[in-house]
Image: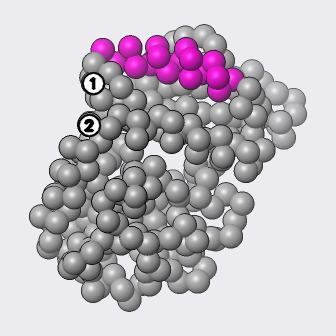
Amino acid sequence: MSTDFLWQNGEVVPAFSISPSRDRTSSGFWLGDGVFETLLVENGSIFALRRHLERLHDAAGKVGVTTDWLDAAIDWGLDLAVKSLSGRTGQIRISLLSSGDCLVIGRVHEIPENPLTLLLYPYPKNQDSILAGVKTLSYGENAHALRYARERGSDDVLFLNQRGEVSESALANLLLFDGSRWWTPPLTSGALPGVTRELLLSNFEVNERVILRRDLGEMKAIALTSSLRDIQAVSKFEEDSYLALSEVDRLRADFQRWRREKVDP
């Protein structure tokens, strides 16, 4: 696997490598066992780095993954990754494997803007799972959900949890506009505690609310949000169309202006 920039366990390398292990139960690579964070880089700065690292520490502690390499990754790997972008907008991913390996990957990134179409994923998300709300390498459920959507001509899915509550998409948190206010599902739905989601809640009058499937047809606008996509409009979910795209444009423009003034809020 090659990439624009790769730092592995203290060394810049041309490609990711992993030593064969006789004990597959201790190999983070073979088990897909670990946690990760994705960071947005603009104008030579990482947005909300402190919040992302706090979430990475929390996730690693929750599932018992070591953070032995993390200080070195922060002090050295991230700096080299940012420099490799040469001022271009990019993304950085930090991965911590349960085997003790640490990877920092950097590549150029373009923030998407085109409206998305979504489908309902037919298999419920377990909101009480130990992995609920954790960015883990075990992305099998999300990967299948994306294949399910794309095989049917859509971009992403919406997950319902086992209580029938709307949770998130396969790749992002969910924002919903009812005509006067913006809402997002609570973390009790099993949604990831997204950094952009958290900043919208604390600075942009977005509020938490339990959302049921029947509520989606009453919404005027829907958007997905994450660090790498900012805020991206949804034009259609199943048979429902969402025409208040200007509301999404307004929120996205306000948030982009704000975050470019607050590099590490």
Indicate the position of residue 226 as horizontal and vertical percent values.
39, 50
Name the residue at 50% across, 70% down: 186
Residue 25 in which image quadrant: top right
Along the polypeptide, which appears first: circle 1 or circle 2? 1
Measured along the vertical axis of the image, is residue 22 above or below residue 198? above
What residue is pinned by disc 1? 43
Indicate the position of residue 151 as horizontal and vertical percent values.
38, 61
Name the residue at 39% across, 65% down: 174
Measured along the vertical axis of the image, is residue 241 above or below residue 259? below
SS assignment at label 1? loop
Magenta segment's dominant SS is helix
Separation of residues labelled 1 and 2 (CA atoms): 9 Å
Badge 1: residue crowd in 10 Å (few <14, some 14–19, many ≥20): some
SS assignment at label 2? helix
Residue closest to the eye, 167 or 193: 193
Q: In this view, does 106 lie to the left or right of 87?
A: right
Q: What stretch is highlighted in magenta?
A: 69-86
What residue is pinned by disc 2? 260
Indicate the position of residue 212 as horizontal and vertical percent values.
44, 84
Residue 89's tag is none
